[in-house]
Image (tube, rainbow, N blue to C red):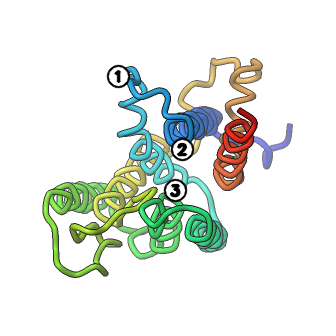
Amino acid sequence: MNEHTIKNKRIWELDVFRGFCILCVIVVHLVFDIQTIFGLLDNMPPLYVFIQEYGGTLFVILSGICVTLGSRNIKRGLIVAGGAVIITAVTVLIFEPELHIWFGILHLLAFCMLTYGIYKKLPPVLTLIIGVTFAITGLYFDKIYVDSPYLFILGLKSRSFSAGDYFPILPYLGFFMIGTFIGKTVYKEKKTLFPRVNESCLLLRFLSWCGRHSFFIYLIHQPVLYGACMLIAASL
């Protein structure tokens, strides 16, 4: 193995964690489809509720870590933005208005990637302070309502606002920036923190594969799940 390969070796645990997160997303959306179409699975266990409530936040933090380890963030941000536009178009065409996605997790991640260069060279501690401030501000915004229907991207909602997936800039840019702090400190050397783990085992390889392809899995999983559930419902 040459020096270039060693230098650019992926950090396996980040791929595995990202893969686990995307599988959790699939489970959450499958449960939602079953609840919506079949009226089943109303009472879910606490672990599921935790994943449903906070899994997205963990994924945003993880994305913040990863953005500090790679390059071509503008290109990747534009690709994710394209996926976000597709998601919006599909939900507007297929679903009821309350399930339309105007600023979901892909929109948020595209924004975060495209704006990362603005604060990329800031000292990590200052990035952390700003990130925590944004997160706290966004959590406060979640408790209030405004009259304008156009400020939801920032986290300021009107009482009539609804969405199938919603990740506003505040607080989630703050969580993303916290992730960049972790990336610049904990992963400063851009190496795995668990070099002794056998990453070639089947489970880790599968999760890692899911993590490396999480964007495309996210794009296709819900149409597949929803379509399958509708087919089953039509055959009953």
How busy is the neighbourhood of tag 2: few (under 14 within 10 Å), some, or many (20 plus)? few
Q: Are marks 2 and 3 in contact (CB under 8 Å)?
A: no
Query: In what element is the residue under mark 1?
Result: helix
Give the residue at x 28% y 77%: 151
Give the residue at x 43% y 46%: 56
* Gap between marks 2 and 1 measured at Cα: 37 Å
User: Which image quarter holds the N terminus?
Assistant: top right
Compared to 147, does 43 lie above or below? above
Horizontal and vertical percent position of residue 12: 65, 34
Q: Look at label 3 and name its amino acid.
A: Thr
Q: Quadrant of residue 70?
A: bottom right
Q: Are marks 1 and 3 in contact (CB under 8 Å)?
A: no
Of mark 2 and mark 1, the one earlier in the sequence is 1
Compared to 24, does 136 lie above or below? below
Dot in front, 1 or 3: 1
Of mark 2 and mark 3, the one earlier in the sequence is 3
Give the residue at x 63% y 18%: 196
Q: Which residue is mark 2?
A: 189
Q: Look at label 2 and name its amino acid.
A: Glu
Q: Which residue is mark 3?
A: 68
* Gap between marks 1 and 3 measured at Cα: 33 Å
Classify residue 123 as left or right of residue 28: left
Q: Which residue is mark 1?
A: 46
Classify residue 48 as left or right of residue 192: left
